[in-house]
Amino acid sequence: MTTNENTSTAIPATARRLGATGPAVFPLGLGCMGMSALYGEADRAESLATVHAFLEAAPEGMSTLLDTGDFYGMGHNELLINEALRTAPTTAREKALTSVKFGALRTVEGGFTGYDGRPEAVKNFLAYSLQRLGRDHIDVYRIARVDPAVPIEETVGAIAEAVQAGHVRHIGLSEVGADTLRRAAAVAPISDLEIEYSLISRGIEDQILPTARELGIGVTAYGVLSRGLISGHFSRDRALAPSDFRGMSPRFQGDNLHRNLDLVDALRKVAEEKGVTVAQTAIAWVLARGEDIVPLVGARRRDRLTEALGAIRVELTAADLAAIEEAVPAGAAAGERYPAAQMAHLDSEH
């Protein structure tokens, strides 16, 4: 056994491949957005410790996926990952793969003003990300949302050039529909599609997921706990910080929140009978949807990460899956997953 396999932090796991052409990775990825933006203040030291714990959770020799965006905190998140990797033990640091989204245009006040997918913009965003991350390449690079003014073929073509130059290893996509997925895959190999997928966000099952599978494209699933809504930790009377974007999310507002937490209460009964937590049940459900799916967990603290990692050990029987889906039927969520203005940017919803 290696040294890492002898430690209590490493979790026995089977790697999952990001599509036919992508890398093999630990079955859970770490979504790092909340360490820098959109969920209120985060503890920097705890964030760094959480990244370290995640890297060390994978068995020796298995890659781990760190997911970020250049617009998370206007570069703050990439700099945080840079620091986390520089201060991690060598064996842990060598496991890290970076998945970066680009293209979002921001204001000083933190607003979003659109997306830029022009080839020259791709090269510009990439140069800045490499500098902030302190790396000579990005493992998976993807535009965060399709730029409606630029054909996806041009954006993907520019990333393909970066692959040829050695600055990017694999091309990914984010929140695109089946038709766009086909158009992009006709230009260059696509490793994976990053898209929201959870018990209460199952829209990809109709067309997008079957198309991805037909094309040999993996799925990196974000929002598996619906931004904490179905984690089992969100209370009905919780007050959100002004900087927490969930305060504007339809699913967290008014009657929608109460109806959605009723679903969580039903899921909790299933989880308790199984002897696991609500969060572990929700994550395990996504893991069970296919070996081509890698769920991202957005843990900002080590205790939440430990809970999420426990989902890898949860084995769901056919009876368990039936009970889960009875508790949270497809389409049962109250409210859209984003405010209307942001929904309009989702190619996956058109």
Image: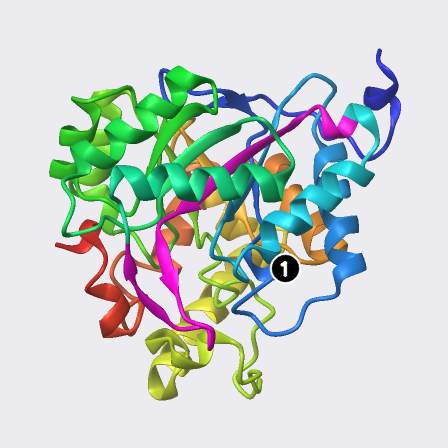
Position of 43 compared to 254: left or right? right
Residue 329: give x, y in percent of width and height. Answer: 30, 58
Q: Residue at x 54, y 63 (%)?
A: 268
Residue 316 visible in rendering: no
Position of 314 compared to 146: left or right? right
Within 10 Å of disc 1 (Cα), the crowding (few <14, some 14-19, many 20+) is: many
Q: Is residue 58 above or below residue 84?
A: above
Position of 204 compared to 198: left or right? left
Q: Which residue is mark 1?
A: 35
The residue lying toward the viewer, choosing from 308 and 55, is 55
Residue 1: give x, y in percent of width and height. Answer: 84, 11
Seen as rendered, the residue at the extreme top is: 1
The residue lying toward the viewer, choosing from 281 and 46, is 46
Residue 104: give x, y in percent of width and height. Answer: 36, 56
Q: Quadrant of the C terminus?
A: bottom left
Number of disc labels: 1
Residue 16 visible in rendering: yes
The residue stretch that appears in magenta: 92-115
